[in-house]
Amino acid sequence: MSGPLHGVKVIEIASIGPGPFAAMLLADLGADVIRIDRAGGAGNPLGEGAWNFMHRGRRSAAVNLKSGGGRELILRLSERADALIEGFRPGVMERLGLGPDDVLARNPKLVYGRMTGYGQDGPLSAVAGHDLNYLSIAGVLGAMGRTGEKPPIPLNLVADFGGGGMLLALGVVSAVLEARTSGQGQVVDAAMVEGSALLATMFHAMRAAGLWNDTPGTNLLDSGAPFYEVYATRDGKWMAVGALEPQFYAELLRRLELDADAFPQWDQPRWPEYKARFATVFATKTRDEWAALLEGAEACVTPVLGLTEAAEHPHNVAREAFVTVDGKVQPAPAPRFSRTPAAVSGPPSEPGADTDAVLADWGIDDVTALRDAGAVT
C-alpha cells in the first residue's frame, strides 16, 4: 500500500494549470489517475508534455472525445472510477455528451469534479480568464501591494493552485468519502474566484474588526510594517523579516544592534522611519552574512532564495523537501503521512504514451478495435 488514497481511481480530462495540479496531488497521495489527452493533435504547450512535472505519477491515454467511440470509452471508464475531473468552460463537457448527467447515469456513485475560473453559472461563467483575472475579481489582487505602487503579480499560485487545484482536490476527496457512505455521487463545482476569496478569509475578518484598511501597503502583513518586510543586502540580494511577535521583534532589534527603546514596535506613524533605518542596516552586510547571523535566531529572519537555491538549502535537504525524478529536481509530495507515505510513482508521460497499457489495466480489452475506429491513438 502506498499513499492514503491507494485504491481510489480517478479520470483526469486533460487541461492546464489547476486541473493537472489537482490530479498530481491525488496521484502523489496514491490514487490511480488516468490522464485523458486529446488524440492526434498538439495541445497547449503550457499544459501538455512530459516536461510538465505536474503530470507526474500518472499515465496518459490519447482519446478522441469528439468521436462516438471515444465518448463511449470515457463512459465505460467512468463505470470503473471513483471520480472524474475536468477543466473546460461550462457546457463543453455537456456538448461532448460527457456532462455530469451522462456520466452519473452510468455510475451514480461517481464524483464529478469541475474546475473553472468563475464557476458553472453567473454572469462571467462563460468568459475567458486566467489567474490574474480571478484574483482581481476576488478582491485579493487589490489587497496586495505597496503604497502608491501597482498590485504585484504573485505568480499564479493563489487562484490556479491554491484556490483552484488544491481546493478541487480537497472537494473530490471529501465527496468520494461521502459517496462511500451514501452510495451517491455528486458534482464538485470548484471556482478559482471563490477559492481565492476563501484564502483571504483572515483579511476579511481583520477588516471587519478594524485591523485592516483598503489602502495596500499600510497594513500589518502587506509591507506596511517594518518588521514584516523584505530588505536588500549589500550584494543586491534580500532578507525576509517576519518578526511579528514582541519577543521576535526584540531579538531582531538586538541582532541589528538597535536600541529597543528607540523603536517601539506598535508606534505605527513611525513605521516608515523604522523601515528606512532597517534598510540602512541590512545594506551593510551580504545576504549570506545576515543569514549566518540571523537564520537560526529567534528573530524570524531568513534569506530570500531562488528556486535552485531552495532545493539546496540544508533544511530542505534534511527534510527531503525536493526529490529527483527521472534526473529532474522538483518539489516532493506533501503533506507527510506516518503510515501511508505519499510518493511520486513515476515521471510525467507524453500525451498518449500509455494508451494500451493503462486501458488494459482498467479492464478495457478492445483497444485494437477502438484504435481502428479512431476512438484512441
Image (spheres, grey):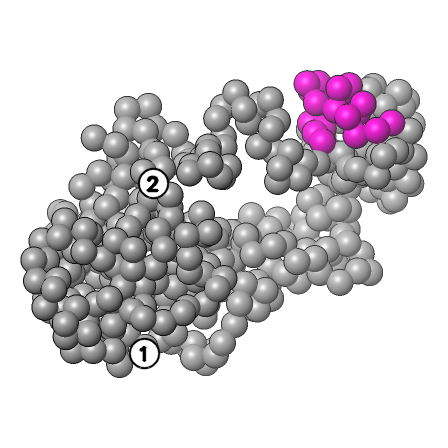
Q: Residue at x 71, y 18 (%)?
A: 297
Task: Decide: is 214 above or below 297.
Answer: below
Q: Is residue 184 magenta?
A: no
Q: Residue at x 73, y 38 (%)?
A: 228
The amino acid type, in three-letter code, at marker 1 is Gly
Is there any visible trace of residue 360 in the rendered image? yes
Residue 154 is left or right of residue 81, and the answer is right
Q: Position of residue 373 (x, y in %)?
A: 14, 75
Task: Decide: is 89 above or below 112.
Answer: below
Q: Quadrant location of the N terminus?
A: top left
Task: Decide: is 29 above or below 50.
Answer: above
Image quarter of residue 287: top right
Q: Residue at x 10, y 68 (%)?
A: 369
For label 2, the residue is 346
Per the model, the C-alpha gap separating discs 2 and 1 is 33 Å
At mark 2, the secondary structure is loop
Q: Nearer the viewer, residue 244 or 29?
A: 29
Residue 155 is left or right of residue 237, and the answer is left
Q: Position of residue 242 (x, y in %)?
A: 70, 33
At mark 1, the secondary structure is loop
Q: Residues within 10 Å of mark 1 (few under 14, many from 20)?
A: few
Q: Nearer the viewer, residue 181 or 88?
A: 88
Q: Position of residue 217 (x, y in %)?
A: 76, 52
- Which region of the structure is painted magenta? 285-303
Q: Is residue 290 magenta?
A: yes
Q: Earlier in the sequence, mark 2 or mark 1?
A: 1
Q: Nearer the viewer, residue 223 or 112?
A: 112
Image quarter of residue 79: bottom left
